[in-house]
Image: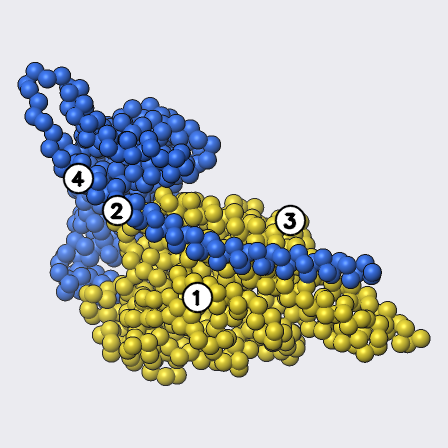
Chain colours: A blue, B yellow
Amino acid sequence: MDIKLLIFIALAIGATFFAVVASLGLVIHKAIHAQTIRKRQHLYSFYSDLIAELLLQNVLPLSPDARTSAIFNQYEIIIQPIKNRLREMSQLKCKIEREILRSVLIDFAKDVRGEISDRLVYFFYSFGFVDEQIKLLSDRRWWIRAQAARDAGLLKARRAITAITACLEDVHPDVRLQSMVSLIRLVGVEAFKTIFRVSKELSLWTAVELSTVIKEYKETTIPYLIEGLQNDSQSVVLFCIEMLAEIGFISAVEPLRKIVENCQDVTIRMKAIEALGRLGDGRAETILLSNLDHAHSEVRLKSMEALERVGAYSAIPILIERMKQNGGNEKIFSARAIASTGKSGVEELNALAQNNKFLLRAVVEQVLEEYQFRVEQV
Amino acid sequence: MFALIFSILLQVYLFYVVFFFVAMNVVYTMLMILSYRKIMFYMRQNLFSDYGLMVKSELTPPVTLLAPAYNEEKTVVESVKSLLKLNYGKYEVLVINDGSKDGTLDVLIQEFDLYRSKQIYIPIISAKPVRGIYKSKKAVYKNLIIVDKVNGGKADALNVGINVSRYEYVCAMDADSLLEEDALQKVMKPFLEDSSVIASGGIIRIANGCEIVNGRVVKVGLSHRLLPLFQVIEYFRAFLSGRMGWQGVNGLLIISGAFGMFKKSAVIEVGGYRSDTVGEDMELVARMHRIKLEKKEPYKIVFVPDPVCWTEVPESLQVLSRQRNRWHRGLLDVIIIHRKMLLNKNYGVIGLAAMPYFFFIELLAPLIEFTGYITAALMLIFGTLHIYLVGLFFIVSLFYGVMFSVCSVLLEEISFRRYPNPKHLALLLAMGVIENFGYRQLTAWWRTKAFYDYARGKKEWGAMQRKGFNKKIDK
């Protein structure tokens, strides 16, 4: 038989075989997946009901001189039926059900407080979930480590604190992020001290997630954020500055002023200027005015923007000079800073509008329109 | 003698066709494997991504949505309203009326209570003149800006949009496409994770057959017509296996014009969109690669398979042929403009893999396929080829085509599962087979014809008639 023919036949058979197997596999996968989901949902609702019942079940009142472990003995009795059920199963089935039980417990842990929460934490330890998580924290697959770090926090597994702290230096950003969040859950606000000390690099994505956690703790995080300003990593310092501005506590003004005065890193300097503007404290005025002459145009723009937020009346003469001398964007930003001082600033701008220079007039008109719009909105 | 030489030439050419076919399938297989790995990685990463936090956090960078509109008075209001409802922190919607001849601007002025703003226009990237910038008197639409400009095409409109935009990240899209509520969050995530990312593209899915209410896809479905169904498979192949695979090696050469996020400073650095090509989206990405590689600056251009932009695809052969013809002319244009990168080791993966792929496989494939049919027919006539060999080759190519279609459906099924109904799955698999009988040959012909049109200097887009989503709103 012709060799070409043989090759073609082989190729055709190969492709046909693959297409048929893949198509069949796809349909079977879809069917199995649907069935698995149904089974899991069923098991999930079964365990949800069971756990809810166990959590609401009354425990016997303890005598005042009872040992602390007495309450644990009672918790242990409560979960015995589940343990017995799992013990009777095959290894595979037990593994699946334990996994579902764990997710049910984690979901409950998100919503409960007080004694019920303590009861849940005991369940986690008693079922061995905490030790499992600690072991998984050193798994070679990053997603397993990240999942374990997250779950350890949700399980309130204080035993895992050391392992989670070590994960703050993990190679994968998601593991680091989950570890940070968990550590905060376990230790509270003091975790920030370790986080800002250990962190070498914070991506904006990590910063976004961490910022929402920090917002929950508000001003209690300020000492740690100020301490974080000493970190060697630019991204960590930028994040701390951003959060200090976001929380808006007055004690942040001084350290930020020092950064603007002394920091040679333009990016950090700009961020600190922006933060000072957001804090809106009059003490920042002098330092902001001195930065209007900075060699870097972005720094000048940031200073103008900050002055707009501070609403510095004394800056008007210098800003008018900048409007007359500097380029397009600086004209606009200066005009906005002038307008933000209120009536007197608007009068100065109106006077400038009489100027013959087209660009200057156009800038004033634009800024006055923005100002008018803002006033109307208010 | 002549017949002998002709017959030898035909045989040599046919060998070339077979070699091309084998090479093409090897590349497709490699892309498929790369895609699978990247999709799995993405799915795992998504387990730890709480996109809702991006809406809450002040750290989330603001974004400008650029929506060029040309003669879209019937759909533009609904589209803008849907864009204003996206779930994202701070963003502005910038609609660029590209000199529409109908009442696009008037309906916008009326609906959103617009006034002509005194905002200064600074043309950082050169573009056609701006006639006016409009803003709404209503506080609820304070993040809406309408720019009215002289007609200059989509690329020119986008350049004007970049000039007017306030924020560092700009999202280029079609005014008549629909973004899913969380699409902006998902397409922005790569920029937050890695500061070297300069562009990120999302997936385009086909809205024909879906149930759409108030500018949102509420039920995913498939069209009852054949052409949109074929295109669903094509889009799967292009996005889930093609783009996903290329981004795995930082070799992504195209971000769809219907939905792509860019770092504004990077776009300005390369000079913005080129308005003298019909493949402006691909050309911009190719230029970004070229300039960054020449400057030896680290950068990444990524594709995210999850943020979805729904678009309406042609349902008539006439419109589809115009679209495919334009796409192919665009591809040809980009390869000619950036021919310097082709097989040039100084451009790394782009020069040695991505550009050759787009040249030898994407660009030449229809030409080779089409001429392959003719050669085979001629050889049959001359009696130098057995009918069973031709038949077998056709069967092999058919099954390989089916195999890749099945694989792309497989990728969709193991990852995003947007088509939950098993009937949809069966229908899509069937389409993977049926498209090889007629549709594939037809698209090959349209794309082959694009060479002729390009040589004639044809540069126009051709009208794209859409039924519009608003009809389905009344359902």
Question: Quarter holding the C terminus of chain B?
Answer: bottom left
Pointer 1 residue: B423
Pointer 3 residue: B346
- From this viewpoint, which residue is outermost toward the left? A64
Determine contact: label 4, label 2, CB under 8 Å. Answer: no
Where disc 2 sits, the SS reads: helix
Q: Horizontal placement of B68 versus B23: left or right? A: left
Give the chain of mark 1. Answer: B
Determine contact: label 4, label 3, CB under 8 Å. Answer: no
Q: Position of residue A370 (x, y in %)?
A: 22, 63
What is the C-alpha distance between the residues marked 1 and 4?
41 Å
Query: Toward the viewer: A263 or B298?
Result: B298
Can residue B136 be seen by looking at this rendering?
yes
Determine contact: label 1, label 4, CB under 8 Å. Answer: no
Give the chain of mark 2. Answer: A
Query: Toward the viewer: B202 or A121?
Result: A121
Query: Toward the viewer: B137 or B227?
Result: B227
Give the chain of mark 4. Answer: A
A133 in relation to A281, above or below: above
Pointer 4 residue: A53
- From this viewpoint, which residue is outermost toward the bottom? B102
**Residue A288 - label:** none
- From this viewpoint, which residue is outermost toward the front? A88
Number of other residues with Cα within 10 Å of mark 2, as a class: few under 14, some 14 to 19, many 20 or more: few
What is the C-alpha distance between the residues marked 3 and 1?
49 Å
- Name the amino acid, label 3: Asn
Pointer 2 residue: A45
Can residue B300 be seen by looking at this rendering?
no
